[in-house]
Amino acid sequence: MRTMVFGGCGNVGSFVAAELIEQGHEVCIFDQHPPSGVLVRYVRRLTFRKGDLTDPAQVLAAVAEQESEAVVLTAAMLAGGIAENPGSGMSLNIGGLLNVLSAAATLKVRRVVFSSTDAVAGETCLVRHEQAAIGPELSVYAASKLLGERLGLLFAHQHDFEFIALRYSLVFGPTPTRGAGIARIFRDILDTVDGRDLKVSAFSGGWRQQITYVSD
């Protein structure tokens, strides 16, 4: 299947693209940064297109020229960044998603897969279930993802394509995390094996978080 991966050079996107290639899919990556890390071994087997997700014309042209049958959206401003810059974050997380959904509707894409978060169930909920009621303690990041899920389902219903939202928690892996937030702090913690001191003041000693390795 011809698949476009928006944000395909990021932490999650790069592993998604690599797995799709291994499964025999024809992959095009749309990102502001060139392939690196796990993607180096696949550069001859993928198409890379540098672009801006917030530009609807670029998104539409990319999907059209690749004749994409499916699109995967992993690009987003993470929790720390969007908390500091909510305007820019919403422009990317919601505006970018709307550009992808509009392109999918216009070009009759069969499937859209959206990277969401388990935080949509509420920031204070330690045990989360897919059917659980949405709590009031949503961060700006979680709110952007919850709205994204609703928009995706709406577009899918109106334009007859499949929309899948994947809710995962604190993904970490070998790809450096851009920007601030929990994922960056977790990577800094791993760096302490080299003897570097790290002070984490954002969380208490009793803080708990489910984590997911990126290849999972």
Image (cartoon, grey):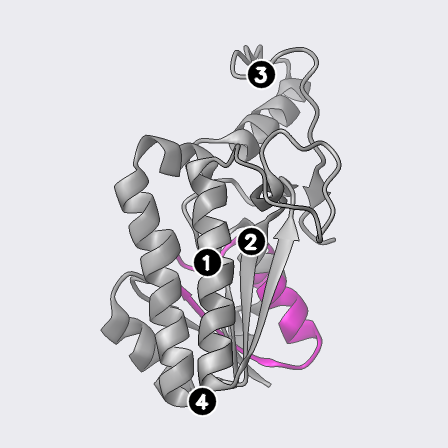
How many residues crowd mark 4 within 10 Å: few (<14), some (14–19), many (20+)? Answer: some
Q: Could you tell me how far apart the alpha carbons at marks 2 and 1 are, in whole angstroms?
A: 8 Å
Q: Nearer the viewer, mark 2 or mark 1?
A: 1
Q: Would residue 119 appear left or right of 24 to someone viewing this image?
A: left
Q: As shown in the figure, which amino acid type bears the numbered disc 2? A: Ser
Q: As shown in the figure, which amino acid type bears the numbered disc 1? A: Gly
Question: Label 4: which residue?
Answer: 108
Where residue 123 sits in the image (x, y, percent)?
Answer: 58, 33
Residue drawn at (75%, 36%) of the image:
127
Instruction: Choose top left, top right, bottom left or bottom right for residue 94.
Output: bottom left
| First along the sequence among labels 4 and 3 | 4
Magenta-colored span: 16-41
| First along the sequence among labels 2 and 1 | 2
| First along the sequence among labels 2 and 3 | 2
Q: Are marks 2 and 1 in contact (CB under 8 Å)?
A: yes
Question: Label 3: which residue?
Answer: 203
Question: Label 2: which residue?
Answer: 116
Where residue 203 sits in the image (x, y, percent)?
Answer: 58, 16
Residue drawn at (38%, 36%) of the image:
81
Question: Label 1: which residue?
Answer: 148
Q: Is residue 93 visible?
A: yes
Q: Would residue 205 appear left or right of 46 to someone viewing this image?
A: right
| First along the sequence among labels 3 and 1 | 1
Q: Secondary structure at mark 1?
A: helix
Instruction: Choose top left, top right, bottom left or bottom right for residue 6.
Output: bottom left
Q: Could you tell me how far apart the alpha carbons at marks 2 and 3 are, in whole angstroms?
A: 23 Å
How many residues crowd mark 2 within 10 Å: few (<14), some (14–19), many (20+)? Answer: many
Q: Could you tell me how far apart the alpha carbons at marks 3 and 1 are, in whole angstroms?
A: 27 Å
Q: Nearer the viewer, mark 4 or mark 1?
A: 1
Q: Is residue 129 positioned above or below 28 on the image?
A: above
Q: Are marks 4 and 3 in contact (CB under 8 Å)?
A: no
Q: Secondary structure at mark 2?
A: strand
